[in-house]
Amino acid sequence: MTQQQWTAVDTYLTELLAPADEVLTAALRDSDAAGLPQISVAPNQGKLLQLLAQVQGAHRILEIGTLGGYSTIWLARALPADGHLVTLEYSPVHADVARGNLARAGLDKLTEVRVGPALDSLAELVDEGAAPFDLVFIDADKANNPHYVEWSIKLTRPGSLIIVDNVVRSGRVADAATTDAAVQGTRAALELIARHPKLAGTALQTVGTKGYDGFALARVLD
Ligand code: SAH
Ligand code: DHB
Ligand code: MG
């Protein structure tokens, strides 16, 4: 199997099941125009996030790693009118692009982009006594993934869902001898999910327009 085949199948599946609309197209266009890296989730992955948020009946969503807000739009569209999404982004430039994209999507009232290192923003959310999030999507600097899982446990409730993006990275996750801090961080997050008494999780490999990668999913237990 080749990238060309994965892309052809993804194009078919995406056009059928997760078609673009003007808001999503404009979000990617403005992200590209501002020079942001093309590392958003694929459309069918965005739709998966949206469906998972709906299955959760999510009223409160936390995203770690906003970029231009593409995944944020998919997730926030799953929220009810009184829902709330907080998304954490290190780069003020990325955050500005995301705010513009969320405003165009009519989601600015439902969403809040917080700028700064996510570890700081997560500590602030705990200090503020933020109500528990029903779903967390972890998609920022991979070296911090175990810390993001730990903070997510503090900021959720039994039954919440924690999703981690990019856990396979072309198979590099299986290299126990890796010196790549991103792969080490992801392995540490997966090992934490495996052993943590408050989590039940799994991970899946994916192929598609974004190459060969994967998601981890963990449910928060009592
Ligand atoms: N979720 C987005 C993609 C996020 S890309 C989507 O699918 O559309 C990862 C983002 O994490 C980048 O915008 C990067 O600036 C941000 N990031 C990297 N390190 C971070 C940190 N320490 N704290 C918060 N955000 C960070
Ligand atoms: C990268 C980050 C992502 O979140 C992603 O989905 C793909 C690639 C990266 O940093 O290269
Ligand atoms: Mg990602």
Image: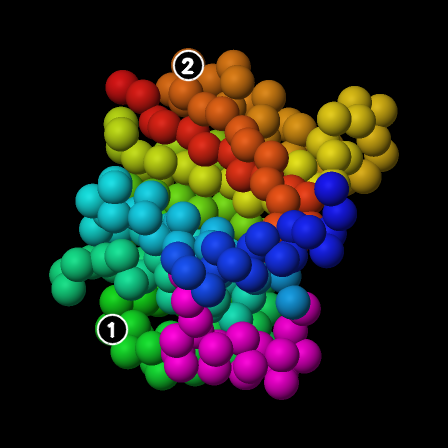
Gap between marks 1 and 2 measured at Cα: 36 Å
Q: Report whether 5 appears left or right of 51.
A: right
Ligand 1 within 8 Å of the CB at mark 1: no
Numbered tag placed on residue 197 in the rendering: 2
In the image, residue 3 sits, relative to residue 116, either above or below, namely above
SS of the residue under disc 1:
loop
Residue at 20% over, 44% down: 57
Mark 1 residue type: Lys
Q: Which mark is residue 109?
A: 1
Disc 2 marks a residue whose amino acid type is Pro
Give the vertical position of 144 relative to 73 (above or below): above
Q: Main secondary structure of the magenta part?
A: helix
Element under disc 2: loop
Write the start and end of the magenta stretch as one range: 18-37
- Residue situated furthest left in the rendering: 82
The x and y percentages for residue 22 are: 40, 81
Q: Residue at x 45, y 40 (%)?
A: 163
The answer to whether residue 121 of the structure is visible from this angle is no
- In the image, taking residue 73 as reference, residue 149 lies left or right, namely right
Res 158 → quadrant: top left
Counting from the top left corner in percent of width and height, residue 52 is at: 33, 44
